[in-house]
Image (cartoon, helix red, strand yellow):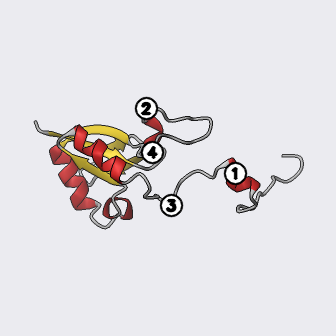
Amino acid sequence: MATVTVGCKLLHGVKLSLSDGTDVMLRGARHAPGFDMRTGEGAPGSVGLTEIDASVWAQIQKEYARWPMLTGGMVFADAKKSKVIDQAKEKAEQKTGLEPISDKELAADKVERIDPPKGQ
């Protein structure tokens, strides 16, 4: 059977449920080589790579045709793994909108901290 390699820029990946009852788990960027779990940062162009059947990818494209992560290029695939890696490098500056907040951003008061109520 033909396979494709799927690249996923979402940090933790995503589980897609298909109409036939199949669940497909796509690895996220945190699975990329060089990803630092401590800082939440990876090398530019970090993506998770998952190999799946080409027919499953075709079904994902059909059932998730309007999903912003697919239409926006955050999840993409090719029959050649090297092409997926090249695409990831091209998309290195493209943001998913779900990136972790860095300590630098927190220190710059760009994000409001909400402390839990006392006693919890």
Q: CA distance from mark 1 to mark 4?
A: 18 Å
Q: Amino acid at mark 1?
A: Lys
Residue bearing the label numbered 1:
104
Q: Amino acid at mark 3?
A: Gly
Instruction: Give the class, few, some or many, for how many residues have Cα within 10 Å of label 1's Cα (few <14, many ≥20).
Output: few
Q: Earlier in the sequence, mark 4 or mark 2?
A: 2
Q: Earlier in the sequence, mark 3 or mark 4?
A: 4
Q: Residue at x 34, y 52 (%)?
A: 90
Q: Quadrant of the N terminus?
A: top left
Q: Amino acid at mark 4?
A: Pro
Question: Residue 6: image x %, image y %?
Answer: 28, 44
Residue bearing the label numbered 2:
33
Question: Residue 43: image x %, image y %?
Answer: 47, 40
Do labels 1 and 4 touch, CB within 8 Å? Answer: no
Q: Confirm whether residue 22 shows in the render.
A: no
Disc number for residue 97: 3
